Amino acid sequence: MAPRLRENYKLIESGVGHHVFATNGSRVFDIDTATADRVAALFSGGDLAQAQLFEQALGNDHRFIEPEAPEVPALRALSLNVAQACNLGCQYCYADEGLFGGKSRTMSVDIARASIDRLIAEAGPGADVVVGFMGGEPLLNRTVVHDATAYAAEQARRNGGRATFSITTNGTTVRDEDAKLFRDHRFMVTVSLDGKRALNDRLHPDHRGGGSYDRALAGLERILKDGGPAHVAARVTVTPGSGDLLEVLEHMISLGVGDAGFSPVQVSPKADLEFRHRDFDWFLEQMIRCGSAARDRLLRGERFPFSNFETALHEIHRGSHRPYPCGAGAAYLSVNADGALYGCHRLVDDDAWAMGNIADGLDETARTAHLDRRHVDRQEPCKSCWARYLCGGGCYHEVDRRGRQHCDYVRGWLSFCIAAYAELYTQAPDYFVSPNTYFEVGPAAAPIN
Amino acid sequence: MSTFPTAPEDPREWKIFPRNLTARAAYIVPGNSIVTRPEDGVDNCYPGLEMDAKNIQKMFFPGLYFEVYRQDGARLAGMKPASLAQRWIDLGLTPGDLQDNLFLWVMHGRNNDLDGAVQVTTFDFTGKQGLYAWRQINSLLPGDLSIAVGPNPPQGQSAFKDAKAAVEAGANKIERDSNGKLMFAAMSAQRLDYLNEQGVLAPEVYDPGDLTRTLCTPWTYDFRDCQCFYWASNKPDVISSEDGQYEYLNFQRKNRNVEPQTQDIAYGYNARRQREVDYAEIMGGWEQLRPVLNGREFGETYVPPEGPTGPIMTLEQIKDELTYLASVEHALAVQYLYAFYSVDVPWKEPEEKETLESFRLWHSARTVFDVAIDEMRHFRWANEILSLLGADTTAKRASTLGRTFKVPFYLQSLSSPQLQWFIDVERPSRSTVAGLDGMYVGILHSLQHLREDEIDPEVRRKAVEIVKLIVDEGEGHYVRFSTAQQNFAFYDHAGRGALPGYILSGEWSEATPNHNPDIPYDTLYGQPARAADAEGAALQADSDRHYQALLILLKIAFAIPEAQISSPALRKAISVMLKMNEVNLEMSAKGYTPLFTLPDGWELDPPVRSSAEASRLLERAHSLLVKPMMAKTLATPTPPPPHPDTGLGAAKAHDSSLSEILDAFSEAIAKSRFRE
């Protein structure tokens, strides 16, 4: 018997044939139908010797990911929670409208500057750094966003590197001066928007219960004006009642953003807006519908920037494999209004994720312990899941609060994406090989295998 | 994808094809990739330079050998191998005809067109370079091939036309003029395969050396042209004479006698080339080039210098010697650092817009600083060996330097005599009794002679490694100081005396008589001087406090036997050094000198053998660092150093506030088990 094959390989069927996904190194192989039958038989109880030969045939002779936690990397990215307050009252907000369960606070210029000094000192001479602005709604503390951006750009330059910037905003308070800042400093801007007017206004009301759609759209228009920043993404937060997601997605993309994607509400102060286990079946079905629509349009050479899908496709193509879901607690940290450091912007003010402060420095013990503890090979049930190195074990914030209730969804979505990858790569290889020119040249010029 | 009805039993025979990037990168392709085929080599850069791929195709026509490295065409240079050449002799072509310089005129054979289809083509090579012909030859497919050779240029249009017609008809034909002189020879055969049936280069076609003769190895002519400014070369351009008397000699000079190079050789390309061995000479007589080691030419056979000689020390003597040497490293580090502070250069590398002169000055001063940092490392390494050998570690500072020098420790500006003294100290010696490195060589020599019941072999192995590192770096110091001396010489040509113009003003330029007979100079410059005004006095006090605290922290860290505890502690201590450096830089710019005053009673301070003793010392460091003046910096991290390249490692690792440093040490002391 060779039960562990299922933990390390996944048999996948696509429109162009059969495939084996090898967890180790996230490698994708094509196999013919007869081989697929053999592999299926092997998975359901082939003998050990044959399983070993199968692994040998796939060249599975070294570990792409070490079982030990890597050394804690230097800090490279820091998000500044400049305003722990928000002008909207989104029903589902994990951040409790930016308060994180506490009082409304804003970050001072001094704390913001000291945070940036700390980031650059930790990153080391010549390093490029990433500065993010989070909240709450960061633009409620506009002065600090503007000051910190100019300061970080200058300090990074003096240090021999470059600073890049990102901001997550609800868009409702964006002014021309903000849009200019985003343009001048090549920001990556993420706008939270939940769909068309009716849906958005229901989920995204302001504190008086009024809608925010028109103001958010006006803000988005301002951001996109005159060429816009480096990238603008729309982030749709999905609740079980969000309805037809393809319709939402098409609406979002029609607004002219660089890409649009979904994120299900897993942690919310309002329990009825949180995803429960069974809601994920609906969500998977909706995501696959959106993904199929995106795949078909990409095959026709049309842009359809569905970020969840395109990110997965390119990661699968590259064979991305990682023992962590993200850089939180490692090269990325978040600082609260008072200068205390936490694992990430979702974990601000959570004592379990405290990782030092900007005055005294990073808590290396906490960071080391975090990497040691959260290596996906040490998580249950992750360590026996074939998708573990693509997933990394799931968002720390969601897993800590809600457990791993979304695993079937993740596996289902990744299986779909691996199949879609094989189809796209067969029929439109240039989408992967020359992504920069694919949409100009079109699929007609791409050779068909 | 085609498919079998059933897959074979053995999974290794299953149809499995890697698709994405990681799968493809990890897939082991059976056999060699096509770029390893000899004909895919780029000119004479065939992978690994095993051979010059051009030489393969010089034998493309059976029985004939062409020379292609020529401007005037592909010349028929020989008729070989004899077995294949016989048929052309039978046809009437004689080896004597070759003396008239016959060239490849025209060729008729098969190759691929741009779309890859096979085509039959006639190539006209008249007026073309040899390498042009070679490229066409290289593209020839196996099969029928006809060529014509004749003198350049063809004797009249009709000769060439007739030859071309004969070639296209596949005829074998020799035409001579009325004097019997060859007009052309047309020959038809099969293109020669360069591989035999076993897939190896046909040994009957190529003689040994045929394929490598144009490579950059000493017995090939390209060797002459490979120079270090042009291509990574395996030969030196310039060397010094065996006795060291002549520093710059042309390695490839024709006259093997040692003589100084004249100006025209130094600056004139042609003059130099004329006095170098030429292509033919280097191929025939490459052995006349002498072995070169460490930039120096040796006689026909390199005789390694004799190994170190001298008395073998006992383990106890080794410990004593090392204890002294550690204190010497400390003294040298301070001497070099002090000298560095005396030079009027910016801390940061000058911007490009400034002159070469200012860059040279900065670079030379920086060399002195960098060597000071090296000495601090040696200070640490010497203590590591002491710790390995089970001896007490030390943070003391030697009061006299060197057994042969016997020079008392003193501080002085980087005057010309002072730089000379640095060079003398670091000069390599091959003896165990002379020079500073000689003392380390003596330790090395003695360590290797200790019996296994005297020293644990593992301890010996580790200790020997460290000593070797120190000796090697010492040799580097000599070279670096010597180079710095040459660079300093560019500065201020006219006014250069014992006190060059780049020394800072203020106390740094003050002359004081030298009362010490062991220093061979009448005057010293810039000895440490107590500042008379309040600002200077405050800065000096600040500098001393940091120096003293640093020594105390080093003493504790050295004494911690566990490497995993002492190393992080040492890194913390570097923060204090950075602070000291900042104060000293500020002070120097204002004309004051640092004092480098040792802590009170330092010479008599007992070695650290207990955590109580370590804690007492740490308390002392605490009171030095946490003075009222320092309180403001207690909780704030050290600002990043003024320039990222401090030579002290990344700023990140040393970016600790004073309280962090003291806390780290008290933690280290608590964890460590000191040697009682």
Image (cartoon, coloured by chain):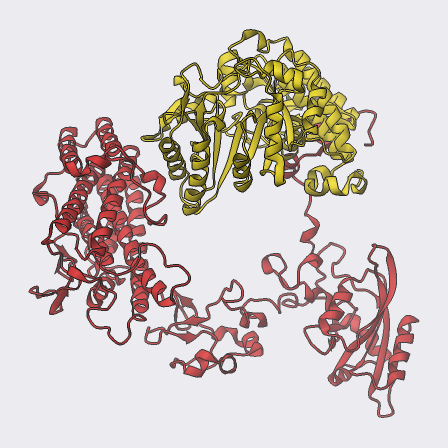
Chain colours: A yellow, B red
- The residue at 44%/78% (across/down) is B266
Give how far across and how far down residue A422 sits, in percent. Answer: 73, 30
Q: Where is residue B217 in the image (x, y as percent from the top left)?
A: 55, 67
Q: In which quarter of the image is residue B433?
A: bottom left
Horizontal side, residue B141 vs residue B346: left or right = right
* Any part of residue A98 in sight: yes
Locate residue B154 relative to residue B528 in the image: left or right.
right
Q: Which image quadrant for residue B559?
A: top left
| Left-right relation of B597 to A439 | left
Name the residue rendered at 38%, 66% in the picture.
B355
- Residue that extends furthest to the bottom in the rendered view of this protein: B179
Question: Residue A65, percent across and down?
Answer: 53, 30
Q: Which residue is drawn at 87% across and 60% down?
A: B119
Q: In which quarter of the image is the N terminus of chain B?
A: top right
Question: Who's the residue at 24% across and 52% down the image?
Answer: B585
Which part of the image, by quadrant, shows the C terminus of chain B?
top left
Picture layout, residue A314 above or below residue B224: above
B231 is higher (above) or lower (below) than A97: below
Tell me: residue B623, above or below residue B303: above
Please count the marks in the image: 0
* Residue B439 in view in this figure: no
Decide if residue B530 is on the left or right side of residue A164: left
Pick the residue in front: A122 or A8.
Answer: A122
Foreground pick, B68 / A165: A165
Q: Residue A351 location in percent, x, y?
A: 38, 18
